[in-house]
């Protein structure tokens, strides 16, 4: 079924990012401000009052949309947030505001600064607390133990995923963890939430990121090459363990069918893939469920640099959440735009024209994909 | 049934477990069994239910071990969070006790008992099935 997005009526026209890592002197709201100003400059928007929608994520130690607008003295038509507003979910909302004519130009603004946060699960219940089930990565870890048992996967699989993230981060000046990682180092590290190691887990960083969406007619007159939202796929799975193989994210297949079906595209058309990787395991589940490789074949796919720059499918070219910073999917959007504009410098995927973002959230309940293109 | 004025289904389930009864909530109308406890059957939307005894036999479908404390409220590592599929067909997350990290395998049989959970409330927990039988034999000998 076709979607409104194939008409290319909504584009990302500005992206802004701060350095990722420690920011002892700048709180989340100020980091968001830095990114907001960078995104406006990138788009060539000098008057911030042209922006009539401001969306943020409050959760995951983010910022409040109303407080942010007060700080920057704006009265937009719409301020907002979602109950689960990591990068992909909020950006689709922004695109919907533009596509429906509710807003003309929407800024998605996020800042995060909470040292020592434990990455507490969203939607954690009393039932979970009675069992000490408190960290998002424990959910990934249970699923990963299922995957390992089912496919006989070894520890090297996620090692390749982590190594790719660090190789990409080394080419990214804003990345928090650009240090190289070898397989020997990876395997020598102890499990933290077995069978996951610290290298498999996104560590909380401080930083800011902003993205500006607008209508096609406005986008064409702005500074940068528009990057159009081309197709989306969504699947929720709140029934949790009543769903077969919930933690292996089978709902991704539904999201894939929606997006690829609407776009008339398939996995082989994707030039670069971006995954919200709270754990490296998310990348494996994405590769298999979206059909980049067959079930149980990710080990072969990620070996020999398969998901690195120059490989068959570059994944998270800026380092992702394991290498660049943990801004819950937002940084991947900034990188995706830079790739499609041809502005990714030493990380550029030659001729990248079609990029896909995939996310999983909460207890693998929220599954989403967005495909972006240039014309 | 729980009295909504005094007790949530979760609290009522804790009370059942505290009394030593291995039970789960079961829908009166369609028989659907549901952990965690709730007011409404997600299968048929009936609000009528009862506590149904379970045999307590399950199989491990997935497991994680907390080996380093990740949350200041839960520092008593190592402990596991295990996805167990019961013989009755339902899946739940539980702690498996009496087993060391690395010794709990996907596919392993486990048996239920009542234990004290991480917040001090009674919970349905498990032990490896063989170990459970051994301890029962010890208790009866």
Image: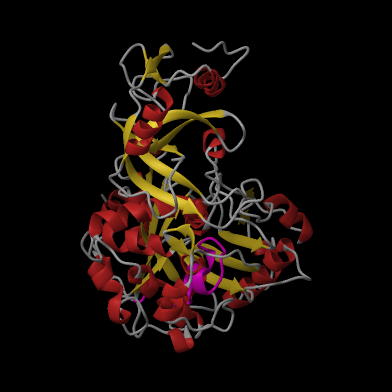
The image quadrant that residue B117 belongs to is top right
Vertical side of B62 occupied by A316: above or below: below
Q: Count the marks.
A: 0
Q: Quadrant of the C terminus of chain B?
A: top left
Is any part of residue A284 visible from this angle? Answer: yes
Residue extent of the magenta highlight: A314-332
Q: Is residue B82 left or right of residue B5?
A: left
Magenta stretch contains residue A223: no
The percent coordinates of residue B53 (x first, y second) are 37, 17
Q: Residue drawn at (27%, 66%), measured in percent from left and top?
A: A298
**A117, A105: nearer the viewer:** A117
**B19, A326: nearer the viewer:** B19
Q: Residue drawn at (53%, 24%), measured in percent from left and top?
A: B10
The image quadrant that residue A152 belongs to is bottom left
**A154, A348: nearer the viewer:** A154
The percent coordinates of residue B13 (x first, y second) are 50, 21
**A25, A145: nearer the viewer:** A145
Q: Residue drawn at (62%, 32%), measured in percent from left and top?
A: B120
Q: How is the image coloured?
A: secondary structure
Vertical side of A246 occupied by B87: above or below: above
Q: Is residue B117 left or right of residue A141?
A: right
The percent coordinates of residue A145 (x first, y second) are 35, 54
Q: Is residue A311 left or right of residue A173?
A: left
């Amino acid at each position: 079924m076709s979607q409104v997005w194939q008409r290319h009526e909504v584009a990302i026209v500005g992206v802004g990012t701060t350095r990722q890592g420690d920011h002892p002197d700048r709180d989340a709201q100020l980091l968001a401000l830095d990114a907001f100003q960078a995104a406006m400059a990138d788009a060539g928007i000098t008057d911030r009052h042209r922006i009539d929608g401001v969306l943020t994520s409050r959760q995951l130690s983010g910022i409040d949309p109303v407080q942010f607008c007060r700080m920057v003295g704006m009265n937009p038509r719409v301020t907002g947030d979602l109950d689960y507003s990591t990068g992909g979910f909020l950006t689709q909302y922004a695109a919907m505001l533009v596509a429906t004519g509710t807003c003309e130009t929407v800024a998605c603004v996020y800042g995060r600064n909470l040292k020592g946060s434990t990455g507490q699960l969203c939607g954690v219940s009393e039932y979970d607390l009675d069992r000490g089930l408190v960290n998002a990565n424990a959910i990934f870890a249970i699923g990963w133990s299922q995957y390992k048992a089912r496919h006989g996967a070894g520890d090297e699989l996620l090692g390749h995923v982590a190594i790719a993230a660090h190789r990409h981060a080394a080419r990214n000046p804003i990345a928090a963890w650009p240090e190289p990682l070898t397989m020997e180092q990876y395997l020598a590290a102890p499990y933290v939430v077995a069978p996951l190691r610290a290298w498999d887990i996104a560590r909380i960083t401080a930083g800011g990121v902003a993205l500006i969406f607008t209508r096609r007619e406005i986008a064409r007159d702005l500074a940068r090459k528009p990057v159009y939202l081309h197709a989306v796929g969504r699947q929720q799975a709140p029934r949790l363990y009543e769903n077969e193989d919930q933690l292996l994210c089978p709902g991704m297949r539904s999201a894939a069918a929606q997006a690829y079906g609407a776009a008339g595209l398939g996995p082989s058309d994707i030039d670069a893939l971006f995954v919200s990787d709270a754990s490296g395991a998310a990348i494996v589940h994405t590769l298999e469920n979206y059909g980049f490789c067959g079930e149980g074949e990710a080990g072969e796919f990620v070996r020999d640099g398969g998901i690195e720059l120059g490989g068959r499918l570059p994944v998270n070219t800026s380092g992702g959440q394991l290498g660049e910073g943990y801004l819950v999917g937002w940084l991947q959007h900034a990188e995706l735009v830079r790739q499609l504009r041809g502005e990714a410098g030493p990380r550029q995927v030659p001729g990248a024209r079609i990029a896909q973002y995939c996310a999983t959230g909460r207890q693998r309940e929220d599954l989403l994909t967005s495909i972006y293109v240039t014309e | 049934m729980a009295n909504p004025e005094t007790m949530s289904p979760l609290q009522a389930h804790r009370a059942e477990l505290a009394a030593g009864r291995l039970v789960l909530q079961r829908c009166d109308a369609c028989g659907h069994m549901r952990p965690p406890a709730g007011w409404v059957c997600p299968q048929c939307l009936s609000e009528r239910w009862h506590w149904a005894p379970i045999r307590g036999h399950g199989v491990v479908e997935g497991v994680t071990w907390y080996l380093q404390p990740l949350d200041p409220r839960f520092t008593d590592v190592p402990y596991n969070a295990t996805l167990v599929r019961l013989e009755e067909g339902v899946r739940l997350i539980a702690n498996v006790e009496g087993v060391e990290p690395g010794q709990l395998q996907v596919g392993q049989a486990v048996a239920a008992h009542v234990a004290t959970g991480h917040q001090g409330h009674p919970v349905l927990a498990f032990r490896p099935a063989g170990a459970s039988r051994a301890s029962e034999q010890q208790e009866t000998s």
